[in-house]
Image (cartoon, helix red, strand yellow):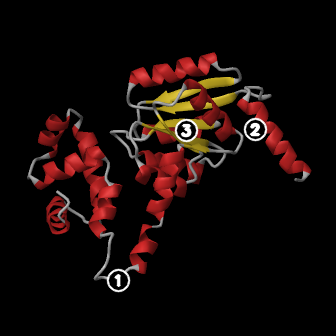
Amino acid sequence: MNNQDEATVHDLAKLALGEAAASIRVFLVDDHPIVRTGLKTLLREEPNMDWVGESEGNWEAIKMIEELSPDVVVVDSELTEIDTMEIARAVSANSPSTAVVVLTSRGDEYSLAQALQYEVAGFITRESSKALIAIAIRAAAAGGGIWDRNLLYRAIRLLRLPTRMQEVSNDTQEITSADIIVQQLSPREMSTLRLVSDGLTNKEIAIKLSCSESAVKGYVTRIMNKLNVTNRTQIALKSSQLNII
């Protein structure tokens, strides 16, 4: 181990113990006020960790992150107004000195697989202890990363799906295009897909899902991207062809 490696390990150890020389500046993105309040309380209780701003989870969050240049962004995995991975992509491209830690409320290996592609520094569940969340933030600020172990293993297997599909013949194919698409869709997107296929409008879907019409528009856009289609009719047609509804 060279001197630089030793210094990095030493810095990580100090961060884990809350002994960083400079405070870690943290920006929060979550559409649930109570969650943001809880995270701010955690930050206030932690040494050398400061809250510098927050967003309820919309496109304005990306602009705020660029302007504030926090050390770490803590973001919910399933926002209603914007795809979490859009934030991760923007931070990776425009704010490379900022690390992203994702908090997930469900076992979502697809989102983690995406997150790995955008160099997200942490991906842990909401149910994680305060201590683990704090360690994840500190590790991210130090250039390290922490991921939920079980989700990470499943995400790695998911990232290998295209290779596995090439390895099996058409007659014995175990993994279908439908399997991959279903893995990609969040529960809220699957609900939206079913309602779109039933012919409901965005307004009607918003009422059914108890969310805003703009949120529904975001779900529909992400569904079209994941299904590689361009309109609602094609969503219904492809869903029927793949038998995923």
SS of the residue at dot 1?
A: loop
| Residue annotated with mark 2 | 12
Q: Position of residue 225 (x, y in %)?
A: 32, 60
Which amino acid, mark 1? Ser
Identify the residue at image location x=43%, y=51%: 109
- Whether residue 70 is visible here, answered yes or no, is no
CA separation in Å, label 2 and label 1: 47 Å
* 218 versus 65 height, above or below: below
| Residue annotated with mark 1 | 169
Q: Position of residue 193 (x, y in %)?
A: 20, 52
Check disc 2: other Cα within 10 Å, few if <14, some if 14-19, many if 20+: many
Residue sitting farthest toward the front: 172
CA separation in Å, label 2 and label 3: 24 Å
In this orientation, which residue lies closer to the viewer: 229 or 15?
A: 15
Identify the residue at image location x=73%, y=26%: 18
SS of the residue at dot 3?
A: helix
* 218 versus 176 height, above or below: above
Q: Position of residue 123 (x, y in %)?
A: 52, 43
Asked if disc 2 and disc 1 are in contact, CB closer than 8 Å, the reply is: no
Which amino acid, mark 3? Ile
* 92 versus 233 height, above or below: above
Q: Position of residue 61 (x, y in %)?
A: 47, 37
